[in-house]
Image (cartoon, grey):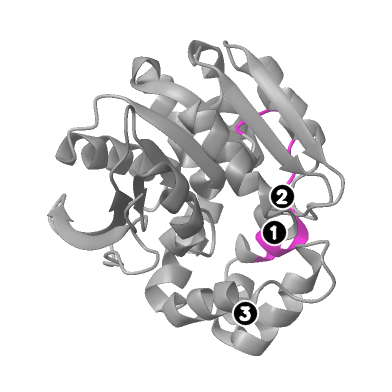
Amino acid sequence: MPAPTEQTEIIDDQPIFWRSAPCEGTPPLYLHGVPSNSDDWTAFLELTGGFAPDLPGFGRSSKRGGRDYTVEGYDRFIEWFCDFNELDKVQLLVHDWGSVGLSWAQRFPEKVERLVIINAVPLLAGYRWHRLARAWRTRVLGELIMGSTNRYVSKQLSREANVTPGPLPDQFLESVDAHFDQGTQRAILELYRTSPEAKLEALGANLGAITCPSLIIWGDQDPYIGGRFADDYAAALGGPSEVLHLPDAGHWPWFDRPDLIERVAGFFNG
């Protein structure tokens, strides 16, 4: 399969960066979380083709002040992105805050042919924000933490996010550090501060409308989101779901278990 290409186009009056690769059939759409970008998906795109945008506020996309960095704002962005690229139907993968794509999918369930959920922020009952998220949600404290976060701090914090001994891979940390500017920090703070737990539950009220086949993958040693939410997502969705619990993986489970990339590719290409 050809290597992914990169492009930047104006969508909703602002520059948006994405990677894409040709594929046969319905293209996958990969949505990253916090604090990363489409770099997460290069190896996936090489096997499946499809599209992977840098969400507004992240990576190389626009970080304009005053933009709507809420779940609702990202929901609308996904709609605009699909319209711009004439994507009438996609195979959707969401990780971490990529779960904003599930808000869009509840509005357009007919546009989702297959769904993969990987350690995604729960649009479900019973979730409580982890300690770093609670700090980010606190005014002044959140700004102080953001301002003091550098490559060294990120590297040390990342040690708890995976099961493989040591911090997350250097390539990942370099990508995050390269784009962790004030625009990204502002987007993260707004996204967390406009998302109390009760709102997350309400945002998932219509998950049952998503009736396509789904694959739910969870690194069970995720320090941020417990493994029970994999099963809760499966129960909430309206279609057939397979749940894959990984006791030997963390929040970015494909770093601990690189074989997951082929597992996802098999689901999308099957």
Asked whether the viewer can see residue 149, the reply is yes
The residue beneath circle 3 is 170
The magenta-colored residue range is 123-135
The verdict on residue 11 being magenta is no
- Cα distance in 3D space between marks 1 and 2: 6 Å
Q: Amino acid at mark 3?
A: Asp
The residue beneath circle 1 is 134
In the rendered structure, find residue 129 and report the number of the disc placed on it.
2
The answer to whether residue 56 is above or below residue 105 is below
* 10 vs 3, nearest the viewer: 3
**Main SS class of the magenta portion in the image:** loop
Which mark is first along the chain, 3 or 2?
2
Question: Is the residue under label 2 in contact with that under label 1 (CB below 8 Å)?
Answer: yes
Q: Name the element at disc 3.
A: helix
x, y (%) of residue 239? 57, 11
Nearer the viewer's eye, disc 3 or disc 1?
A: 3
Q: Name the element at disc 2.
A: loop
Total number of numbered discs in the rendering:
3
Question: Is the residue under label 1 in contact with that under label 3 (CB below 8 Å)?
Answer: no
In the rendered structure, find residue 143 and report the number of the disc placed on it.
none
x, y (%) of residue 70? 42, 47
Q: Quadrant of residue 130?
A: bottom right
Residue at x-position 60% and y-position 82%: 149
Which mark is first along the chain, 1 or 3?
1
